[in-house]
Image (cartoon, grey):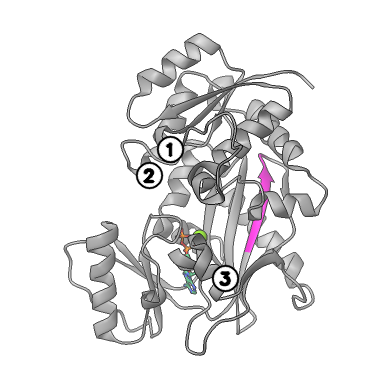
């Protein structure tokens, strides 16, 4: 294996220290994925140069001039604090002909816009919950075709931002309140979707042209109080106490109905292609009580933290964390960006 010079791009506030010795889990939590990736790349024997990025592309350019990296490992999720600007950082890398890991700008742009994404999926006859977008500054009028309960979320935020039990609305008043909440607190347009009762599934995929899907993963809610919906709220995703209280467990999805397993994998590969994704991604799905598979969203460049769903599901099929990082590097190096002609 060739020794590579790797510039690891990440948020300025998340540049990890060289060692985590003596630090508590809580102290590590915020930048653990950045630490895991850098440590994993070093364990592979590469030369690793971490770089914090927040609002200055000049810094990126200078680091590239200085280190002449074979590849930039992209962990950037925002620029100027704006989540959808991550695609522009990747565009910049492409414009200066710098190979990078993960998704290309077009795939990032398409999948960040959940509404646009759903329009594309419906063209390709891939099932996704029925929806409408309520724009900021406009009145909320529910079309007849969308009955309650509805799920209200941001049209382009990630990580369950603004999602709580209140996101499921059952009447007009709750709908108006929750849309206003997204407009005012998440500060984006709001997406109202048919609420799908069912199992919460995730599928991790890797590849450019030829795709590999890792085993289907499931989030289970093993101690859910009566009346609470089984959804991945902000707290369920990020708060250890909530996870413990609700008995949140993630692992391979067991006992899927016959054939559903293959159906899900095939849907996920089609989604990956019709959204022009590259590198690696994770799909979020629901298996409805009606037996149908619904695609909720595609996540290009998902969390690479060791022990999280993406790495865990790879490990399940014998791909160690280091092997996974090396595959992501190889895909970045072989990606056919347009400038390659
Ligand atoms: N239409 C829906 N029906 C049921 N649950 C949903 C629906 N949309 C979102 N959820 C729940 O909310 C979680 C977060 O929604 P998602 O669309 O994946 O946004 P994010 O980008 O914040 O992860 C999902 O994992 C799921 O548990
Ligand atoms: Mg999600």
Read off the residue under disc 3: 244
Q: Spatial distance from mark 1 to mark 3, Cα to Cα?
A: 35 Å
Whether residue 47 appears in this view of the structure is yes
Residue 146: give x, y in percent of width and height.
38, 81
- Residue toward you, 34 or 120: 34
Q: What range of the chain is rendered magenta?
A: 202-208
Looking at the image, the residue that sits furthest to the top is 66
Q: Main secondary structure of the magenta part?
A: strand
Read off the residue under disc 2: 84
- Name the secondary structure under disc 1: helix
Circle 3 residues within 10 Å: few <14, some 14–19, many ≥20: some
- Name the secondary structure under disc 3: helix
Total labels: the figure holds 3
Residue 94: give x, y in percent of width and height.
49, 25
Mark identifier at residue 178: none
Q: Residue at x 29, y 65 (%)?
A: 182
Mark identifier at residue 87: 1
Q: Which residue is drawn at 18% across and 71% down?
A: 139
- Of badges 1 and 3, nearer the viewer stands 3
Looking at the image, the residue that sits furthest to the right is 318
Which comes sooner in the sequence, label 3 or label 2? Answer: 2
């Amino acid at each position: 294996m060739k020794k590579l010079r790797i510039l690891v791009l990440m948020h300025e506030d998340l540049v990890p220290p060289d060692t985590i010795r003596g630090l508590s889990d809580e102290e590590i939590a915020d930048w653990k994925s950045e630490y895991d990736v850098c440590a994993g790349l070093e364990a592979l024997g590469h030369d690793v140069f971490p770089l914090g990025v927040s609002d200055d592309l000049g810094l990126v350019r200078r680091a590239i001039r200085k280190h002449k990296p074979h590849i930039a490992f992209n962990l950037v999720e925002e620029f100027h604090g704006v989540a959808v600007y991550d695609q522009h950082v990747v565009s910049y890398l492409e414009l200066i002909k710098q190979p990078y890991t993960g998704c290309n700008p077009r795939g990032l742009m398409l999948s960040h816009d959940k509404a646009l994404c759903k329009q594309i999926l419906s063209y390709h006859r891939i099932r996704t919950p029925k929806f409408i977008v309520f724009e900021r500054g406009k009145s909320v009028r529910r079309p007849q075709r969308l009955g309650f309960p509805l799920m209200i979320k941001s049209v382009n935020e990630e990580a369950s931002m603004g999602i709580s039990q209140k996101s499921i609305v059952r009447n007009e008043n709750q709908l108006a309140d929750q849309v206003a909440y997204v407009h005012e607190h998440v500060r984006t347009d709001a997406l109202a979707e048919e609420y799908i009762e069912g199992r919460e599934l995730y599928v991790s995929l890797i590849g450019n042209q030829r795709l590999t899907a890792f085993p289907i993963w499931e989030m289970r809610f093993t101690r859910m109080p009566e009346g609470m919906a089984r959804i991945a709220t902000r707290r369920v995703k990020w708060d250890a106490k909530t996870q413990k209280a609700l008995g949140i467990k993630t692992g391979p999805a067991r006992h899927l109905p016959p054939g559903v397993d293959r159906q899900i994998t095939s849907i996920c590969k089609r989604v990956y292609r019709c959204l022009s994704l590259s590198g690696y991604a994770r799909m979020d799905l629901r298996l409805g009580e009606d037996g149908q598979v619904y695609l909720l969203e595609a996540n290009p460049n998902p969390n690479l933290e060791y022990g999280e769903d993406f790495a865990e599901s790879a490990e399940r099929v014998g791909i160690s964390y280091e092997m996974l990082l090396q595959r992501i590097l190889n895909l970045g190096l072989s990606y056919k960006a347009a400038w390659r002609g």
